Amino acid sequence: MENLSNIQKEIFDNKVKKGFNTTNVEFEFCLTYEELAEAFEAYRKKSATVGEELADVAIFLYGIAEILGFDLNNEILKKVDKNKNRVYKNVDEIPE
């Protein structure tokens, strides 16, 4: 994995190769949530594994995107661009 252009496909191919779920999207969302909770727990405990746990979250997101047929890198770039032009009323509020 030298760059991000093929990472989504590589992540999905690894799921297939290892026999992991590639069809039950609801289950994948639950596993992603579990990984996010693990990242938060590592952060809370000031563990050195926070980065690895965040990577797990990203891996699950890329896997879900591949299952659903979205190019996650492209979606992220579009969202970052959209956020650049977004006007926030209060930085403490969560945008819609």
Image (cartoon, rainbow, N blue to C red):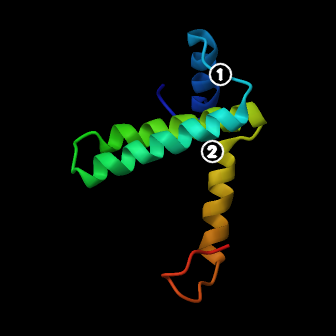
Q: Position of residue 40 (x, y in %)?
A: 37, 51
Q: Residue at x 53, y 34 (%)?
A: 59
Q: State the residue in front, 84 or 92.
A: 92
Q: Quadrant of residue 8?
A: top right
Question: What amino acid is at disc 1?
Answer: Asn
The answer to which image quadrant residue 20 occupies is top right
Residue at mark 1: 21
* Side (left or right) of 35 relative to 15: left
Label 2 with label 1: CB-CB less than 8 Å: no
The alpha-carbon separation of the residues under discs 2 and 1 comes to 22 Å
Label 2, residues with CA under 10 Å away: few <14, some 14-19, many ≥20: some
Q: Amino acid at mark 2?
A: Asn
Image side of residue 80 versus residue 45, left or right? right
Mark 1 lies on a secondary structure that is loop
Is 35 drawn above or below residue 11 in the view shown?
A: below
Kindly identify the residue that appears in the image at 61 percent across and 37 percent down.
62
- Tag 1 or tag 2, which sits nearer the N-term? 1
Given residues 6 and 69, the one toward you in this image is 69
Could one spot residue 4 in this view of the protein? Answer: no
Residue 17 position, x and y percent, is 60, 10
Badge 2 is on which residue?
A: 73
For residue 67, side relative to residue 44 (left or right): right
Instruction: State whether residue 13 is above or below residue 62.
Output: above
